[in-house]
Amino acid sequence: MYATPVSNLIDELSKMPGIGPKSAQRLAFYLLKASQEDAQKLAEAIVHLKETVKFCPVCYNVTDEPECEFCADTHRDDTIICVVEEANDIVSMEKTGEYRGRYHVLGGAISPIDGIGPDDLRIKELLKRLEGDEVAEIIVATNPNIEGEATGMYLAKLIKPLGVTVTRLASGLPIGGDLEYADEVTLGSALKGRREI
Amino acid sequence: MRLDRLELINYRNYDRTIFDFSPQLNLIIGGNAQGKTNVLEAVYFLSAGNSHRISSASQLIKQGEMSSAIRSKITKDNGPITLEVMLSPSEKKRVKVGGVEKRRFSDLLGHLHAVIFSPEDLQLVKGGPERRRSFLDDTVVQIYPPHDYWRRRYERVLRQRNILLKSRSQGVDDGSLELWDKNLVEAGTKLVVGRLTVLNKLDKFATQAHLQITNQTETLRIDYLSRVTSGGVEGPREIGGKFHKELVKRRKDELDRKITLVGPHRDDLTLTVNGADVRLYGSQGQQRTVALALKLGQFRLIEEEVKERPLLLLDDVMSELDDDRRSFLVETIRSGTQVFITATTRDSIADQHIGDCKVIRIKDGKLIDEG
């Protein structure tokens, strides 16, 4: 349908998450119309990203330093590690301003449908970090879907016998929302996870 | 409740067509393959979030188009509301309620209620268990929308678990199955509880309708057939406990056969008429009557539960039914029900007068309005 360079670009773009064929087409034609300079900048940004950004050897966050900022920060609490699926989940946790411990990025969640088993995640690396007796608690902050929960269960099974406390983020009502507008499933989950006041 | 206006955009064989409906009877007339059923399908889609004919929404998009939409104006007892659904093969289904885009597509559910009668209904009796399970689940969703969440969640865990079972070497238990059991049991229990609660009431209405159609001579009985419940007065705790116990018991079997053997995805409904399983021993006529009774039961159940009369969609069924059943169906349609009937000619329903009638003629995805 299109000249080969155009359809090549559309193919590459539509591999990205959240980009369907239609969005890919729109982006490709935007780039076609963009100035040579803008296109060059984008291409360079992508190449630069791949050349300079690496995984932090401790927590597997993305970083362009030898260690990521959260591992290098000497003021953070070493006794607690928050386990997340992807590096961008760290940003969400940091925005809360409530957490001062360390992180560990698994690189996904257990999902047979996608061919991802425990061995494909950075779980061995996490266990290695627990070898010294410093860590007292692991917070499992995987997504609240069934894959995230199965991953959490797997971690708990592995880590609890080591004498480390394993906790899971609570799920439930959004702050500032009215009970009346909460959907039944969320409300049910909040009810199940209720606590004494 | 009534549907005042329906707008189809790039939907099936429609480019862009607006239908204005009568609050009573709407006759949709046209030759074969002109798009009659597509109109009913779109109305049903607004009530159920899926098509009664196919499972993939991308098939609903007009060939060669990138997206399609169904827009509607509805009047309920407590006021007017608009529902809008947008479909695209590459993106998630989207929904707007009252003009506001909702975060989840399932927010569509619970606004418009419709019951569809179609020639395929006979498969409810003759077909495989999955037909009866989805009929029951669809009914639950109409009166209790969160059932849809548990249904999809259960299907997802089940798929994960089955793929895991297939990838294991035969008979080896490395503990990985266990990770999915808790969620399988939780979602499965919710499914079973929802089904049992609704079936209890559906049974009453369907049996009533069945007695009426058969002049009080044949008694229909619907039972829930399951490994995880005996169907009685068991609560979630008992059902969940039994489900889990059964999973553990069948673990070795599951590992050998590489598939999940326990759970609501294997449940069924047994339909008996005067003590005999109508699926195995019923005549074609008896099976038709049971299918009709199930749908009428569904109609009356939804009416009682949501306190508004659902829309009645009759897809090409008038020609399928014999005189007795047809007149019974028409009698059931009391005034105040908005009805949509498809037929190839007006004659097939000419002698049935149900109220104010609007004739909508359709040819090749276009409207020839006759008022």
Image: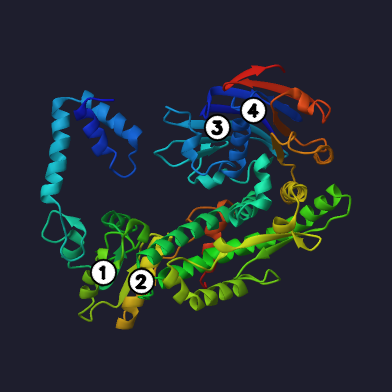
Q: Are marks 2 and 4 on the same chain?
A: no
Label 3, on which residue?
Answer: B70
Find residue A123 and name its label: 1
Label 2, on which residue?
Answer: A154
CA–CA distance between discs 2 and 4? 52 Å
Q: Residue at x 81, y 60 (%)?
A: B274
What secondary structure is found at the residue carrying circle 1? helix
CA–CA distance between discs 1 and 3? 47 Å
Are dots 4 and 1 in contact, CB under 8 Å? Answer: no
Q: Are marks 1 and 3 on the same chain?
A: no
- Where residue B150 appears, x then y in whole percent? 54, 58
What secondary structure is found at the residue carrying circle 4? strand
- Where residue B266 appears, x then y in whole percent? 56, 63
What secondary structure is found at the residue carrying circle 3? strand
Are dots 2 and 1 in contact, CB under 8 Å? Answer: yes
CA–CA distance between discs 2 and 1? 10 Å
